[in-house]
Image (cartoon, rainbow, N blue to C red):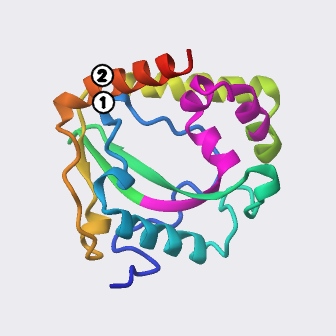
Amino acid sequence: MDVPEILPGEDRSLGSDLFVDLVPATCWFTHVRSCVSPADWRRLRQMITERAGQRCEACGAGPDPAQHRRLEAHERWMFDDDAGVQRLKRLICLCSDCHAVTHYGLAQIRGHGEQALEHLMRVTGMTRQEALAHVRRAFEIWEERSERVWDLDLSILTDAGVTLAPPPAAAARPGIAAQTLHDKRASRG
């Protein structure tokens, strides 16, 4: 089955620019890739990169193996504070450099925080001070959102006929996240 170019209910105007977009700790391990089969993930990723013309939707870059830059799929979420729902609203094509910016906390853990900050400034035209303020605000939002458990709404995928595997239970996610981070840090020495 083909995936439609525009998913039912997808907001293609949401989040085309580059910004730090941290996923609350209580939502870790609820990304699309963990909820779909490898075959469906390949189909979704292919649709996303093709509809973007094989270009990053934030900076316009294409894949460049010499620069270790690939095109990746990224989820844009809306958070309904009243209902406690994390709703997938868009899938966007980002180059690996822009993707590192959106997951700035992960970039820092991997030792690439400064490169991500430089890329954010280059793409957006922010000064260093503006970029650092933007990052601080993103972490403030992350802290607020990480204080609660969110229900996951992936209806733009199920309405397109994509079969989902259930994500880890909300109560189990913080423990899984902590263990995964611990294991990654331990594997580095």
- Residue at (37% x, 48% y) in the render: 31
Name the chief secondary structure element in magenta. helix
Of 111 and 145, the residue lying toward us: 111
Which residue is the site of mark 1? Answer: 26
Query: What whole-number distance in Å separates the C-alpha atoms at marks 1 and 2?
Result: 8 Å
Q: As shown in the figure, which amino acid type bears the numbered disc 2?
A: Glu
Task: Name the residue: 20% across, 42% down.
Answer: 83
* Residue at numbered disc 2: 147
Residue 102 on the magenta span: yes
Amino acid carrying label 1: it is: Thr
The percent position of residue 113, horizontal first and vertical second, equals 68, 27
**If the image is split into quadrants, where does the C terminus sit?**
top right
Would you place residue 34 above or below residue 161 in this image?
above
The number of callouts visible is 2
Question: Considering only vertical position in the picture, is 186 above or below 165?
Answer: above
Residue 173 numbered mark, or none: none
Q: Earlier in the sequence, mark 1 or mark 2?
A: 1
Q: Position of residue 173 (x, y in %)?
A: 26, 31
| Front one among 65 and 116 | 65
Q: Which residues are magenta?
A: 90-119
Badge 1 vs badge 2, beta-carbon distance below 8 Å: yes
